[in-house]
Image (cartoon, rainbow, N blue to C red):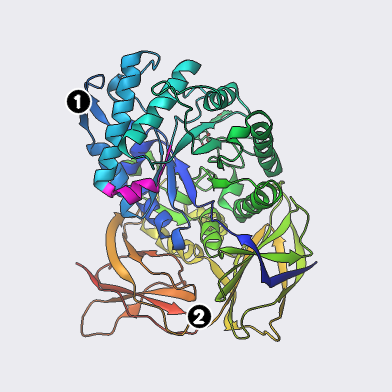
Amino acid sequence: MELTVDAATATGPLEHFWCSTGFTPASLLLDEDMRQQLAYLGSVPFGGVKYARIHFLLELVRGAGFYDERPDIDWSLLDAGLDALHAEGLKPFFELMGNPGGYFDNFEEDRQAQGWRRFIRELALHCIDRYGLDEVRSWYFETWNEPDHGWWKQSDRAFHIYYDACSNGLRDADAKLRFGGPGTATHMSERLLSLLRHLDGGSDYFTGDRPRVDFISVHEKGAESSLEEIDPDMRGVVEREVALVEHLRKNHPALADVPIMNNECDPQIGWSQTHSWRGRPYYAALIARTVNDHLRRMVDQLGVRYELLSNDNGFLGFWGQRTHLARYGGDGPRKYGRFEQIKKPAHNIMTMLALLGDQRLAVRGEPVLYADLGLLATRRGDEQVAILIYHGRDRIMSSGNQSIDLAIEGLPFDEAALMHYRIDEEHTNPYRLWTAGRRLWAQHVGHEHAELFAAMRNEQELALIDGPRPAQISGGRLTLNLDLPLPAVSLILLTKKPASPPGPVHGLRARRYNGLTGQTQLMLRWHDEGSRALHTYEVLRTEDPDVPPQRVNGPDILCTGYLHVGDDVRGIYRIRAVDQWGRSGEPSEPVHIE
Ligand code: 8U8
């Protein structure tokens, strides 16, 4: 197969609309293992995971007097949950879902409608007070989750009144807070269609005006809930979203330009059911393919304002469940806050996608829409070209290999460093170590498993299979031959040497967790302005200020977080960035761990 990227021709901007995940219930935010997962999510570079869409956040609110002018509201649990997100650099995708104090069971009753509007205003004002106006304006607020699917117990009319109460309550706090919905579960469900009629032709319960909507969200997934191994239909996911767009254009032209989301865009319903492909590269390749298929079909062909695509995969679970991390520690250990978590390929694909540029590039020889193999060619100014190539199929049990002659023409530089990252069965795939090593596993995990977990952690970072090395560019042209197994994802970066070495790393902080092996885990997190020429961060440690520090991270890391695990997790830690030419930035300020 021959593919040619024309780096001189940008075809349009690339919005990173996939930077989201979700989970339920909100009370998980208060648990240590979720806190560690949030650290991992927040550490995906360049805001690669920004939003966490969480059901039942309002169940964290306590209070009384919600029908009164001045209800007595206890925000403390919600604050603790949102603080945990905020501390890790994440934002809520805020579903206005829950029944605080048990006051809200029928929004057709006017005092409930008025009370909910006041409550939502108080909620928004409280969040603005705590996190700042600009921050809260960058969140999304959404209706109740899946109001067509048993999560909503009230009438259709009550749903519209609830919708208007949310909309007005947010507006009472600030006119620029973003609100939409309905995040429905079933394709073209009556609840969705009736909300669309309310938005286009109905009138706001409070103002009598046309109701506002900032985005329309639905859930389309690739397969039904089942314990069987069912092949996902991700093409069907996109085409069902297309049917929604066509419905809007035909029946509600006034809504045709409203941004669209699929904020539970999962290959299969049933997050907790176990399907081993969810722990393997297959899932990562499907995510990459689904992003590109959305770009080509929704953005290029239909000109849709595609606002957000979220995999609902921020749960806590094991390899075969729909999660970013494989979490070890049953209900017993969980109670005592002891666990181990390992990054899956579905997590690493978010880092790969985050490394893409902000402009798309023209491609010659591009496979047809919905092909198994595809590429997303991008650049960022004249500094970097980033090309994602995936091989993923709507068939779980398939294998193969494609040899590709890739030419990149019209490069804006003649000298560049080349990096080639890879997720496939042999790379960035700690699950294979688990399946090989699990004979060690009994009913518990103990100190004897420390080596296995260390091996999996060495395998859990994005694998570099070529580079850094000088790219052989001549006349602005480079050719590469690569073999892409099925399933797999490759990311090729060509980066011009920046004039200066990486800048300093800021805001280093540390948090302890307790592993199942008896070792201590120290999660280090930092901020970085973000050099796109990064090769790795180095986690430096010394126990004695007079002794030069040693690097403790085995694998190279691109994320702004690292879990240092060991028996002697103490000393003075600093982080520095190293670029693809081996130049180090200034180390961060230290943290001292006793
Ligand atoms: C249609 C349907 C069938 C079913 O058995 O379970 C469902 C669960 C169905 C639709 C939605 C649904 O809940 C959403 O999907 C879940 C999942 O596990 O796929 C979760 O991801 C979501 O929290 C939930 O909103």
Query: Looking at the picture, which amino acid does disc 1 mark?
Result: Arg
Mark 2 residue CB less than 8 A from any atom of ligand 1: no
Question: Which residue: 38% across, 32% down?
Answer: 56
* Nearer to us in this view, 97 or 215: 215
**SS at mark 2?**
loop
Question: Which residue: 41% across, 60% down?
Answer: 43
Query: Looking at the picture, which amino acid does disc 2 mark?
Result: Gln
Percent of width and height locating residue 179: 44, 37
Question: Which residue: 46% across, 56% down?
Answer: 342
Q: Mark 2 packing: few (<14 Cα in 10 Å), some, or many (20+)?
A: many
> Label 1: which residue?
70
- Considering only vertical position in the picture, is 92 above or below 446? above
The residues bearing labels 2 and 1 have C-alpha atoms spaced at a distance of 58 Å
- Most distant residue in the top direction: 109
Q: Is residue 421 visible?
A: yes
> Label 2: which residue?
580
Q: Is residue 163 left or right of residue 485?
A: left
Percent of width and height locating residue 134: 34, 51
Q: Mark 1 packing: few (<14 Cα in 10 Å), some, or many (20+)?
A: few
In primary-sequence order, the first of circles 2 and 1 is 1
Q: Is residue 153 visible?
A: no
Where's ligand 1: which quadrant? top right
Q: Magenta residues?
A: 131-141
Percent of width and height locating residue 453: 44, 60
Q: Is residue 140 magenta?
A: yes
